[in-house]
Amino acid sequence: MTPTDTLGRPLRDLRISVTDRCNFRCRYCMPREVFGKDYEFLARDLLLTFEEIERVARVSARLGVRKIRLTGGEPLLRKGVEDLVAMLAGVPGIDDLTMTTNGSLLARKAEALAGAGLHRVTVSLDSLDDATFAAMNDAGVAVGAILEGIDAAAGAGLTPVKVNVVVKRGVNDAEVPAIARHFRGTGHIVRFIEYMDVGHTNGWRLDDVVPAAEIVAAIAAEAPLQPVAAGYPGEVARRWRYEDGSGEIGVISSVTAPFCGSCTRARLSAEGMLYTCLFATGGHDLRALLRDGADDEALAGALTTVWEQRGDRYSELRSSRTVGLPKIEMSYIGG
Ligand code: SAM
Ligand code: SF4
Ligand code: SF4
């Protein structure tokens, strides 16, 4: 039976981080000063195996999870990730199997991922300007490589492709209308994300956040928009469609208009910690259970207990007091 938490929210989505490593060093996520060459990432034997991940997914699906998103770190860095996709595609009850990626390896991998049964992808791309993009990813990756990845994903049928753009004041906010224009009419859905105070290394300040309402107004000034009803309960993005029928955009306003009330997401870190909020300060060790020989019933019981105790609503409670608190890094917990 599907557990509900203390605020009446069911468990529906599972975000699985398959690695804490990344080939980018986005300033807002893995700043190079912290994630430098001496940074110790998780050792291989600490990572959940594909079989362990599939077991958690299978048991979660029995409990009501319908949507799985693979993430990281950069999920395409996990060796053989398409084999994991194939295993998850065979889990009964999952009707949406997707991945969030920085897109840098997608041109090479899109066909294999689609062949393995991935339904669609979300590609992160913060700028169409090489200098701005390089400053944001701090890894010297050019925009063209990501656009090729997006084309390859669309060509492989991983559609609709969503494009995540984190908007940071004074960095890429002036580019918002141009990014929207670039993808208008392509069938890809751009989702503009308010910069969040996730983790504690990115030096987040409220002044850096561009409110979703400002983002929508900037786009609508060029191409009128009308709101679209949510596709399903718990959808993170507020959706807007172009009045002329040339597509839609989304905005994820976790700072200015939090959506904790409909948050049905659990997160599994690469080493098997289960978190019930992106801003959690602690998790629950499923790897220990799995490696101690717990059967599916015990695993289902543990997941149910964790979920039934959940009361997280960080974004609704966000204040000057919460912002500086220690939190888990997004590259670890999974975006
Ligand atoms: N590496 C993959 C990628 O970048 O798509 C997947 C993991 S990443 C942590 C998932 C998403 O979180 C990305 O779209 C990224 O832009 C977003 N993200 C990371 N740090 C963020 C922050 N501080 N505020 C808002 N979004 C953030
Ligand atoms: Fe890597 Fe994604 Fe974080 Fe950028 S946002 S550093 S691509 S994990
Ligand atoms: Fe869900 Fe936590 Fe984000 Fe609120 S702050 S929407 S509870 S992940």
Image (cartoon, grey):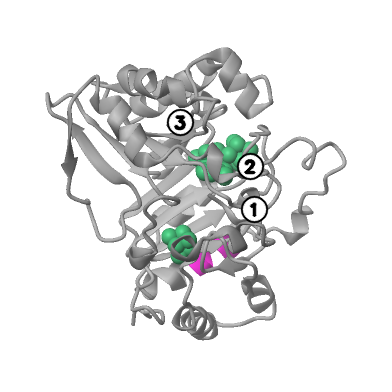
Residue 52 visible (yes or no): yes
- Label 3 sits on residue: 110
Who comes first in sequence, dot 1 or dot 2?
A: 2
> Dot 2 lies on which element?
loop
Q: Position of residue 140 (x, y in %)?
A: 67, 19
Disc 2 Cβ-to-ligand 2 distance below 8 Å:
yes
Q: How much space separates mark 1 and mark 2, taking CA atoms? A: 8 Å
Viewer-side residue, 50 vs 200: 200
Viewer-side residue, 126 vs 67: 126
Residue 217 quadrant: top left
- Label 2 sits on residue: 29
Residue 161 visible (yes or no): no
Q: Do residues under tags 1 and 2 come within 8 Å of each other at their CB atoms?
A: yes
Residue at image position (36%, 33%) is 215
Task: Give the extent of the magenta segment.
Answer: 51-57
Label 1 Cα crowd, 10 Å radius (few <14 / some 14-19 / many 20+): many
Label 3 Cα crowd, 10 Å radius (few <14 / some 14-19 / many 20+): many
Quadrant position of ligand 2? top right
> Dot 3 lies on which element?
helix
- Label 1 sits on residue: 199
